[in-house]
Amino acid sequence: MGLIKKICCVGAGFVGGPTMAVFADKCPQLNIEIVDINKERINDWNQNDLTKLPIFEPGLKEIIQRVRGKNLHFSCDIEPAIKNADMVFISVNTPIKQKGVGAGETSDLRWVEACARKISEVATGHTIVVEKSTLPVRTAKTIKDILNASNPKVDRFENKKSFSVLSNPEFLAEGTAIINLERPDRVLIGGDDDYAIESLKKIYLNWVPPERIICSNLWSSELSKLTANAFLAQRISSINSITALCEVTGADIKEVGKAVGSDSRIGEKFISPGPGFGGSCFKKDILNLVYLCRYFGLSEVAEFWNSIVKINSWQKKRIYSLIVDKLYGNLFEKNIAILGFAFKSNTNDTRESPAIDICKDLIKEGAHLNIHDYKVSKQAISKELDLDLDPFTNVLSRESTSKSWSFFDDVYQATKEVDAIIIITEWEDYKKIDWELIVHNLRKPSWIFDTRVLLEPSYFKNMDVNFWQLGLGF
Ligand code: UDX
Ligand code: ADP
């Protein structure tokens, strides 16, 4: 067993891509191969035109330009990449299970399991396997069991195969992934094999100060990831619950948030009110935590965390109902512009975006939507709005919703002659557009609904438009 020279990362997604790009950039001595079963995704990562990379992330394309083809490679050649690697990262998707035991509550581990089986089959010599994807606690045990049951037990050189499993959860947030990876608050490495832990630690030490690298046992590491995300999501549900109270009492959530966040024990981060948290992690991680609590009979703890998800769904429904109410309870033959479809700004990711539920509900009421986003494509929106999973048959069907919405890449065209505008993603550029012109072109009487507290309400006071802002009373 020597120093780690070759790394294979299975899964070229939002986690694997940026993480390995930063590894390659910070560690020129490493040779990294990112592999994926999705050919289209790999082709996109290999595009000459760096604006067409499959993931939009500030700072990513500059790094890809520096390292791609040098010490970072993207391919679909999964077996040779695993075979040659000293360390394999598992960065595959782990969405919520859609059917069977734990459906809607825990992660679907089919991709993780397939990945572990492949590693078990083709790895050679000693291989350190690192869980990078967010996983339910004790998944490392599943991975270990599969790896240790490897068949054959020896590799092609007749060397005995052996494995160490580490948990190294990702804490990157989309939109700031590169900064989070380059200057992490902490790196967490969980495991029970000191050699493996040291090997991974040595890689991070190329750019992360030693005091920021925390080592723990496997289960603490897996549980810390879920808990960190649950704490963050809890802050958002807390502030969102107060928005409703502000609206009925005459308080202003901006003022309340400032006063509350100024307490250094609370802090000002992660208390921006909005239409509800989205993204691939928060809901999934809390549901995993709830599932785990229920499994161990901790029903009060399960209910506590479950309420965070409940408030999140309630906020989306609340906003939708309020819009219907303001538009005289009728959306039939009304046009509404949706500004922003990504789950937050600075990303093209739409997973669990609050826009999905709000748009679906508005469409069901009979509205026609003009959807605009700076980075999300029409195809991505179609995937979220037009495909529905039938809860009884589990079959994906294309709903008739496709005629109920149109995609616009020009914000002025999207808002022309509509009855209402709803801001759902907090793109900074929405602050800079010509609102006077937009208001002039609305069908009257018209409404602007600012669910991200992005705009200055006083600016609209003398304009011919009704202005509603989340958490702003009276
Ligand atoms: C999150 C965690 O932050 C990250 O550490 C973890 O590794 C993955 O999950 P991400 O989902 O990419 O990252 O984005 P994040 O910035 O956490 O935002 C999640 C959601 O919460 C977004 O919909 C965002 O708009 C919302 N949010 C965030 C708020 O509504 N208010 C806030 O104050 C912060
Ligand atoms: P994340 O946000 O966790 O990175 P993504 O869905 O963006 O999730 O990316 C996960 C990637 O993993 C996808 O591109 C998917 O094709 C890939 N993947 C899933 N299973 C396997 C597998 N067994 N082998 C290789 N790649 C896989």
Image (cartoon, helix red, strand yellow):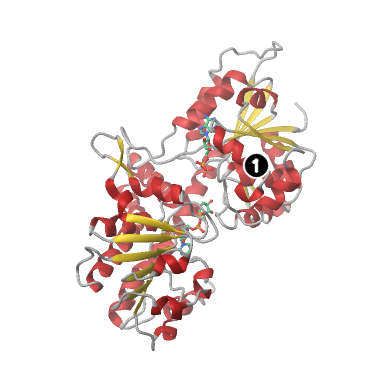
Name the residue tied to disc 1.
47
Q: Is residue 28 left or right of residue 127?
A: right
Residue 176 in picture, x, y percent from top left: 59, 58
Q: Is residue 253 left or right of residue 142?
A: left
* Front position in the image: 211 or 446: 446
Residue drawn at point x = 40 percent, y = 60 percent: 371
Q: Amino acid at mark 1?
A: Gln
* Front position in the image: 137 or 317: 317
On the rendered image, what quadrant is the C terminus found in? bottom left
Residue drawn at point x = 74 percent, y = 38 percent: 69
In this rendering, is residue 243 above or below 211?
below
Can residue 100 be seen by looking at this rendering? Answer: yes
Label 1 Cα crowd, 10 Å radius (few <14 / some 14-19 / many 20+) = few
Residue drawn at point x = 71 percent, y = 12 percent: 157
* Front position in the image: 352 or 201: 352
> Does any atom of ligand 2 lie closer than 8 Å to the CB of label 1?
no
